[in-house]
Amino acid sequence: MTERTPRTVLLRGGAVYSPADPFATAMLVEGEHVAWVGSDGAAEAYAQTADEIVELDGALVTPAFVDAHVHATSAGLALTGLDLTGSPSLAAALDALTAFVAARPRPDGVLIGHGWDETRWPEGRPPTLAELDAAAGGAAVYLSRTDVHSALATSALRELTDGLADRPGHHADGPLTRDAHHAVRKAALAHLTADQRRAAQRAALARAAELGIGALHECAGPEISSEQDLAALLELAAEGTGPEVFGYWGELAERGGVETARRLGAVGAGGDLFVDGAIGSHTACLHADYADADHTGTSYLSAEQVADHVAACTEAGLQAGFHAIGDAAIAAVIDGVRAAGERLGADRVRALRHRIEHAEALDDKTVAAFAELGLTASVQPAFDATWGGPDGMYVQRLGAERAAALNPFAALLRAGVPLAFGSDVPVTPLDPWGTVRAAAFHRTPEHRISVRAAFTAHTRGGWRAIGRDQDGVLVPGAIASYAIWAADELVVQAPDSRVAGWSTDPRSGTPGLPDLTPGHPLPACLRTVVRGRTVYRADAG
């Protein structure tokens, strides 16, 4: 049978962000790959034979974004369920819950919402169980806190959760944390129907496509989702109508995590394999007490367990990864990875590019250890934009000195540590340009990086994190996953004098990106293309 000639698409009349030609205004795509980039004049040679010509009319073409840490079903449920992210007070949140329940027929299952944050409310506290039950009118409701490491659960949902009162983190009249939270979340998600799950996943993938995101790293696991959830998501993504999805399964090798990851088609046994929790929920594991609590948080895994998992993954040729936010948790991962290197050989461990997710509380010694061990930092700049600054949650929980040391992106970059940016949606929303802006305009100036470096971390960085070094750039031979943007004047932007910048003179050969100065409108996505397939068009109605 004769092989079909790949479809060719010529884009011209815009600006193409490519290291192959910093002055490129046109690009040719053949099938799933970029075939050529160059000038409009040279593009005339391809115009007669192209199957489609896209007139850019001055628009910007860039590689599609990669969000390196998502929870697609939870993100979709936040989009389609009760969103409390903007609730200005406890009273407003309870009123929103009442209205949400009233607008729906009383279900047999569980109603799900997300995003409450008591640190932003004038009352300064979450609701009591009695207040929650009254607002919910007896319905079974699960409401995750903004960091997704604690949750509110009505009495009706608590009754659906076996052995809840005996689990660590159970609180009879307040938010659930630790094992109690994991159990109630599992009970809530277990009551989702297959149609509800698929609708949520479709909503999340569609939203990502609308924002110019071409690939997602789904961080699944037995404590945050389920095997069925990840399998369904990967099956949906394989239909090819939206972004690509690369799955991670966060379960220890000693519990079958490597085998399960392989069976599910995951690219790694990691992601949200919890070493600790989150700062906002007082469960990130610290060396010193919280500023507003007389404890150091929660530790879920020891350095020895980390070492065993990394060794097993390395022997299986599979990437490992861990959720670690607090300095004590990160130290446990560092010690464990180093111990695995001593068992198997440091080069063999480094070759797998094992990951640490979030990695917020770092000092110079820890940053150096990342570089030494070949670790990838999968980080979320929107965390700083949301909770940083002198009046933010980080200062409340840690005090000003420790808060100012969080999320040191510039130090990681200087040390040569690979960065992969993500959102951790629904913790913070899918917002790729906002993420780049958050890194470039970090609330602590010495942690800022250039817009160009931040953009690379949110495009090519996500591909490098899964060992695909050739992708995430628009050069001949790379996959044709790109986005087209309506953007104002393009600039070469280093927003702080301490950040290395590039000449703004066009003769320097440095391609420009949109101006992301706070207050400027972010670029609007006109089209998203994944492996040569259009998955979103703004003009498609």
Image (tube, rainbow, N blue to C red):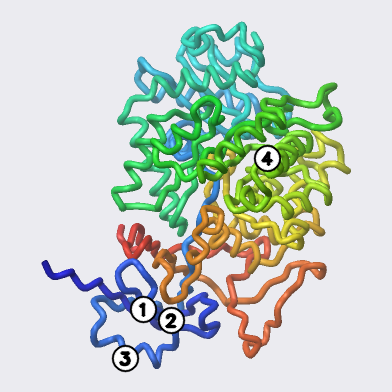
Disc 2 packing (10 Å; few <14; some 14–19; many ≥20): many
Tell me which numbered mark, 2 or 1, is placed earlier along the sequence.
1
Question: How crowded is the residue under tag 3: few (<14 C-alpha within 10 Å), some, or many (20+)?
Answer: few
Residue 491 picture location, percent across and down: 63, 76
Check disc 2 and report the residue beneath it: 37
Q: Residue at x 29, y 48 (%)?
A: 239
Name the spot of residue 48 as percent of width and height, x first. 24, 87
Q: Amino acid at mark 4?
A: Arg
Element on which disc 1 rests? strand
Query: Mark number for residue 343?
Result: 4
Dot 3 amino acid type: Ala
**Residue picked out by circle 1:** 28
The residue furthest bottom is 41
**1 vs 4, front mark:** 4
Quadrant for the N terminus, please. Answer: bottom left
Q: Amino acid at mark 1?
A: Leu
Instruction: Report the mark closest to the observer, 4 or 2.
Output: 4
Amino acid beneath label 2: Val
229 vs 84, nearest the viewer = 229
